Amino acid sequence: MVPLSHYLIVSAILFFIGVLGVLLRRNVIVVFMSIEIMLNAVNLSLIGFDRFLNQHDGQVFSFMVMAVAAAEVSVGLAIIISIFRKKPTINLDEFNIMKW
């Protein structure tokens, strides 16, 4: 059996990589992928705690996180496509359409 600390270490590394991707990258698609990496890190820690505590609540919460992530991606990509039609760029620094 894999100890809980290994799950949490890998989860923390994935979450840190996701945070770096959100903070350092300016491409919208890369930012969305980084957010997905952070959500998967949370899923990994939920499943790790689920195995450690021998309960099934972590799997249910992990499924809910995946459902929220799917909804977030669909809405986010729809917004990106609508903005891309107005201004053909995916650079976050140039998204100033909503400014007055």
Image: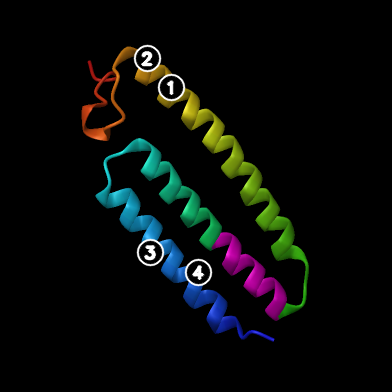
Which residue is found at the position 31% from the left and 57% from the top?
A: 20
Position in image of residue 42 (x %, y %):
54, 61
Q: Is residue 64 above or below residue 85?
A: below
* Residue 50 falls left or right of residue 36: right
The C terminus lies in which quarter of the figure? top left
Task: Of the two numbered discs 2 and 3 on the same chain, state the one appearing first in sequence.
Answer: 3
Secondary structure of the residue carrying tag 4 is helix
Secondary structure of the residue carrying tag 2 is helix
| Kind of residue sitting beneath label 3 | Phe
* Residue at mark 4 to residue at mark 3: CA–CA distance: 9 Å
Task: Of the two numbered discs 2 and 4 on the same chain, state the one appearing first in sequence.
Answer: 4
User: Along the line of sight, which residue is nearer the eye, 64 or 80?
Assistant: 80
Do callouts 2 and 1 mark residues in contact (Cβ within 8 Å)?
yes
Which residue is found at the position 28% from the left and 46% from the top?
A: 25
Q: Nearer the viewer, mark 1 or mark 4?
A: 1
Task: Of the two numbered discs 4 and 3 on the same chain, state the one appearing first in sequence.
Answer: 4
Which residue is found at the position 45% from the left and 70% from the top?
A: 12
* Residue 1 falls left or right of residue 56: left
- Which residue in the structure is indicated by mark 4? 11
| Kind of residue sitting beneath label 4 | Ser
Q: What kind of colouring is applied to the model shown?
A: rainbow
**Magenta part of the protein: which range?**
42-52
- Which residue in the structure is indicated by mark 1? 81
- Which residue in the structure is indicated by mark 3? 16
* Residue at mark 2 to residue at mark 4: CA–CA distance: 37 Å
Judge the density around disc 2: few (<14), some (14-19), many (≥20) Cα neighbours within 10 Å.
few
Do callouts 4 and 3 mark residues in contact (Cβ within 8 Å)?
no
| Kind of residue sitting beneath label 2 | Arg
Position in image of residue 30 (x %, y %):
37, 44
The outermost residue toward the front is: 88
